[in-house]
Amino acid sequence: MGKHWLVKDDQYVRKWYHRKVAEEIGRVLHRSTFAVRTRAIDLGCSKPPHPMTHKEKAYILRSYKNIPISKIAKRLNRAPMRIYELLKKEGLSAPAKRPWTNRENKLLKQLYGKFAIKQLAAQLDRTAVSLYVRAKVLDLTGKHR
């Protein structure tokens, strides 16, 4: 069984669940995204997200090819899955993942294990998961902190 939920944690979930993505709430409360979503269901506050505005839809459709979905979602305070759902509904798909450049590979080899993954991710404008995956490809695993 996981760690117990405190009253203040429940209050935070109730207050922010419809205004922030579960991942962000999880970071604040030191919980997984799954734990936050499950707790929201238990608390009865897991209603469907508010509908996207025409302005939000237009921004997504204008930006999805040039801006990572994660950044669009963060800017709109939406879950990335909602962006993907809209694109699918419109008969579109997110562009292929950005390929790693030689410069990025070189930096990752030099810095992996010397800095925290979050710092490296910010430096390279990548997600932590993409760093872990690339480090495995480059045989750097076991060296991170």
Image (spheres, rainbow, N blue to C red):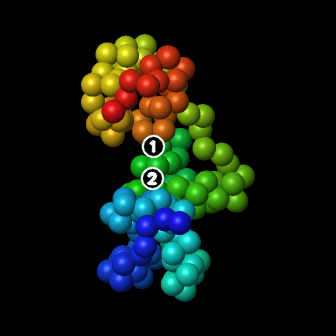
Which of these two is toward me, 112 or 126? 112
Q: Amino acid at mark 2?
A: Ile
Splitting the image into 4 quarters, where does residue 106 fall?
top left
Q: Residue furthest bottom?
A: 44
Q: Observer-nearest residue: 57 or 142?
A: 142
Give the quarter of the figure containing the C terminus. top left
Residue at horizontal 38%, vertical 24%?
Answer: 143
Local crowd size for mark 1, using a 10 Å CA cut-off: few (<14), some (14–19), many (≥20): few
What residue do we see at 35% from left, 66% from top? 29
Mark 1 secondary-structure assignment: loop
Give left or right: position of 17 versus 123: right
138 and 71: which one is in front?
Answer: 138
In the rendered image, is residue 119 in sight? Answer: yes
**Residue placed farthest to the front in the image?**
1
The residue drawn where x is 49% and y is 65% is 2
Query: Spatial distance from mark 2 to mark 1, Cα to Cα?
Result: 7 Å
When asked about the image quadrant of residue 19, the answer is bottom left
Q: Which mark is residue 72?
A: 2
Which residue is at 61% across, 54% downward? Answer: 84
Percent position of residue 69, x then y: 50, 48
Q: Residue 11 location in percent, x, y?
A: 36, 83
From the viewer's perspective, is residue 54 above or below residue 138? below
Q: Amino acid at mark 1?
A: Ile
**Which mark is drawn over residue 67?**
1
